[in-house]
Amino acid sequence: MSPVAPPQAAHRANAPVAVVVSVVLTALVLVFLLPNLWYGLHDISDIPVYQGYSQRIAHGERPFTPSFEVEYPPLAIPLFRLPGHADDLHAYAHWFTIDMGIVTLLAAAVTAVAACRFWPRGGRAYVAAVLFPVGVALIGAIIVNRYDAAVALLIAIFLLCLSARWHTAAAFVLGLGFALKFTPAAMLPLVLILVGHPRRWVWPLVAFGAAAATPFLPYVFSSPRGLWYVFQYHLERPLQIESVLGTPMLFGKLIGVSQATWGYSHGSHSLVAKGAALAGNMSGALTVLAVAGIYLLIWRRRARLRAAAPDVAIAVLALILALMTFGKVLSPQYFIWTLPAWALVAARDRVIAVLGGLTLLLTGVEFPKYYWNILDMQHGPLALLIARDVMLVATFGFAAWRLWGLGESTVGLETAVNPTLPNAGVE
């Protein structure tokens, strides 16, 4: 009887190769695909808003004052100033696009490195490295028309920190995210759960607090009212027309059983329909419940998440989707935030890959090409938006279900803790 050959260990993932693959493919998307879509590269862009802020600052005005109110957190200001050319919108738009392209390339590189740390052996890291540029292609040119690529970069760095169990650094990155776009702060409890005993929370909390508060400090005492406007602006925003909570009203309009139109407030188009105000008022509580529900699942699976680092990506994706799905504002650029976590989860979950990919694709098709048609309540574009929101709900629900179903197998925990074992971290 011939001896049975021992199973061979999967080959080790080469991080530099994964990074090069992801960056090159992302660059090809940015340079060749995005400028040649079925709409203009800068259609419905926020770049003129950023240029206006940059111009006023260049002329000596101080932001976050009663006479110069800004709706973005303070860490966004350096990004608005980065392109230069404050008095030339065309040149400013050109360099802002390049800057966001570079940020997107960095996010691709960091995501690839995180994938290699999650799966040091086998080909799964390369799949994640390819999926990131696929996501960029699906979401379209909006990635260079908003500053949300910087949020995606911070989330990619956050995932990299979690892959290496650098929890204090992860909390610091979330603090920067709060000063950039607020919402990343919702992932701080995840870090604390992963850290373990509350006595080990001190340094992550200090790191988060320092990173979150420092960008605000120059304005706290000099113009607190101007700084409060940043928070007041977002608290007062009405229900946005693209929000999931507005989908039932749009569906009613689509089938002719209700009336809906739009208004303009706080820099976006709000939904004017019966029940819209109630849905907007309920969004905060619904978001808290959704995020709390995800954290309940995270708490139930905390042992698994602490031991099996790759599973942390599904927790991060579920939290981001919870914030998006039940918020009263759902701008298309928010989907950029999902790219790093989606690429990592989709690398080993075909259902999340398909659901999330379709959600990104429908967003890229809908905005900006058919946005004005949606405001006109045209049936085809309305149906497209409704389908996108339904796909978002499905993606969130399936991500939550995947989180709930994480196994507790001791064998799986052993291979996750010891990356030298064959196929470590691969299920």
Image (spheres, rainbow, N blue to C red):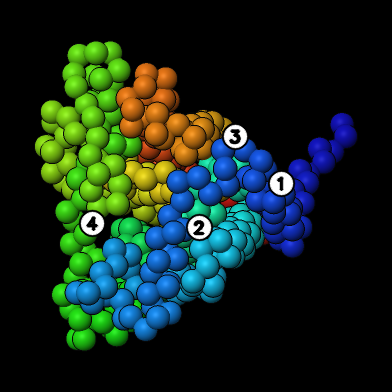
The residue carrying pointer 4 sits among few (fewer than 14), some (14 to 19) or many (20 or more) residues within 10 Å by Cα, namely: some
Instruction: For marks 3 and 2, give the CA distance.
Output: 22 Å
Residue flagged by tag 2: what amino acid is it? Ala
Which of labels 3 and 4 is toward the front? 3
Label whose residue precedes the other's in the sequence (4 or 1): 1
Which residue, given by chain and number where applicable, does mark 2 sit on?
149
Which residue, given by chain and number where applicable, does mark 1 sit on?
32
Instruction: For marks 2 and 1, give the CA distance.
Output: 19 Å
Spot occupied by residue 292 in the image (x, y as percentages of width and height):
24, 48
Label whose residue precedes the other's in the sequence (2 or 4): 2
In the rendered image, the vertical position of residue 279 relative to residue 335, given as above or below:
above
In the rendered image, the vertical position of residue 106 relative to residue 67, given as above or below:
above
Q: Residue furthest top?
A: 256
Question: What number is the disc on residue 234?
Answer: 4
Residue flagged by tag 4: what amino acid is it? His
* Element marked by disc 3: loop
Label whose residue precedes the other's in the sequence (1 or 3): 1
Label whose residue precedes the other's in the sequence (3 or 2): 3
Q: Is residue 338 left or right of residue 286?
A: right
Which of labels 2 and 1 is toward the front? 1
Which residue, given by chain and number where applicable, does mark 3 sit on?
38
